[in-house]
Amino acid sequence: MPSLSFTAALGLLSLLPAAQAGWNQNSNNNIVVYWGQNSGSVGQNRLSYYCQNAPDVDVINISFMVGITNLNLNLANVGNNCTSFPQAPNLLNCPQVAADIVECQQTYGKTIMMSLFGSTYSESGFSSSSAAVSAAQEIWAMYGPVQSGNSTPRPFGNAVVDGFDFDLEDPIENNMEPFAAELKTLMNANTSKKFYLSAAPQCPYPDVSDQSFLNGQVAFDWVNVQFYNNGCGVSHYPTDFNWATWDNWAKTVSANKNAKVLIGTPANVGGANAGSFPTDSQLSGAINLAKGSSSFGGVMLWDMAQLFSNTGYLAKIVADLGGSSSPPPPPPPSTTLATVTRTSTASTGPTSSPPSGGNGGSVPQWGQCGGNGYTGPTQCQAPFKCVVESEWWSSCQ
Ligand SMILES: *[C@@H]1O[C@H](CO)[C@@H](O)[C@H](O)[C@H]1NC(C)=O
Ligand SMILES: *[C@@H]1O[C@H](CO)[C@@H](O)[C@H](O)[C@H]1NC(C)=O
């Protein structure tokens, strides 16, 4: 969705759907983009770059945790800026991503999901139900709220993700449902913050890799259906695009009858998904069809690096969804970013000091300073004031 603060400044507010930053379960125009895999090797930037420059993107999916029994985090070229843990040599230790997650959440209102598995995952699930439960507890200790006294390595330090995404493409998966159920239980037990669970099945129904947990008892908030690389994809609209099947899944099969279905589509003609890139009119047609269903939740794009190499594509999709695209907000000066980061980490330590600069606060112009569920800094830099724009979003103006 367009960044509310920026569109308000342009006076376009009345033209927009209920705009907000971050995932909105009641919206049909969420935009979810995967980051971390540098698909097509077009040049992937650090996470904060995209949060600063993609105001229309609500959810960013960090991909992937490719090994869980044998801990393995793969972030393609981003891994060059990480180290590893002595006790888990394939687990990346990424302070830069940690800082970027906090900035994306607090300054730009993004929902940051940790994507598990991915197409190279080959552990076929867990050896037993109890092994699955232990693995879920370990993943929660790694990426969920910091647990004092727990020595599980945390790839993103004290940053806490907003939820987990299952992208399973391994056809054999044992005990995946107890894994999902335990993760969901741990997420629900924390009432101070809303955590989400999503999955990325392929469009042929039922998806071979995901059926045990998508047809089961675990409530997923949304599915990023991969409507590509298959005959049921958007590039086969209108004849074989199987939207109705997934709409039916959401309403009659899903444990969560309010689950949203997103149209997943490649972000560019090249890369790994060449051959299933839809024409503009096919994508517009598919989105229009889906808009007629209450289960429609928006669009998922694979992936961020491809999206940024396809100029104008995000704006086209925002228009198809019924919004007006916003140009990126003016990036805050780097000294401001440093202040935001410092303030948020310092506030957890014993020697917390007031934000520097003597201007009263740390949140820059257009940064988030309030809203339901927001826990970041609330004081605006002078001369800006924190303006309430919706239940979910206040920003410095
Ligand atoms: C690696 O870190 C450098 C220096 O901060 C940054 O400019 C670059 O974007 C980072 N690369 C990735 C892929 O995250
Ligand atoms: C719940 O999550 C919040 C946000 O990450 C965290 O600060 C808090 O400690 C968590 N509570 C429990 C009981 O884990």
Image (tube, rainbow, N blue to C red):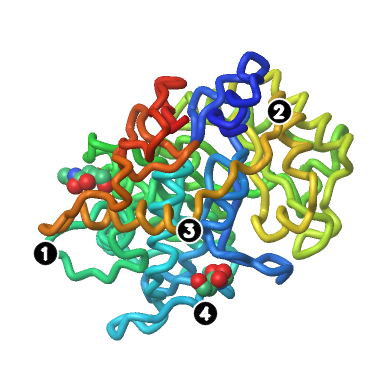
Q: Label 1 crowding class (10 Å Cα cut-off): few <14, some 14-19, many 20+?
A: few
Q: Position of residue 56 (x, y in %)?
A: 62, 38
Q: Is residue 51 above or below residue 17?
A: below
Q: CA distance from mark 1 to mark 4?
A: 29 Å
Residue at 42% across / 46% down in the picture? 105
Q: Is residue 151 left or right of residue 59?
A: left
Front position in the image: 264 or 37: 37
Q: Which residue is mark 1?
A: 149
Res 289 quadrant in image: top right
Answer with mark 1 or mark 4, whichever residue precedes in sequence.
Answer: 4
Please name the residue that numbered disc 4 is placed on: 80
Q: Position of residue 325 (x, y in %)?
A: 70, 33
- Label count reads 4
Ligand 1: does it lie within 8 Å of the C-beta at label 3? no
On the image, numbered disc 2 is attached to which residue? Answer: 324
Residue 170 in sight in this render: no
Q: Position of residue 350 (x, y in %)?
A: 10, 58
Mark 4 burial class by Cα count in 10 Å: few <14, some 14-19, many 20+:
few
Q: Residues within 10 Å of mark 2 (few under 14, many from 20)?
A: many
Please name the amino acid that badge 1 sits on. Answer: Gly
Marks 3 and 1, Cα distance to the nearest angstrom? 34 Å
- Which callout, 4 or 3, points to the residue nearer the camera? 3
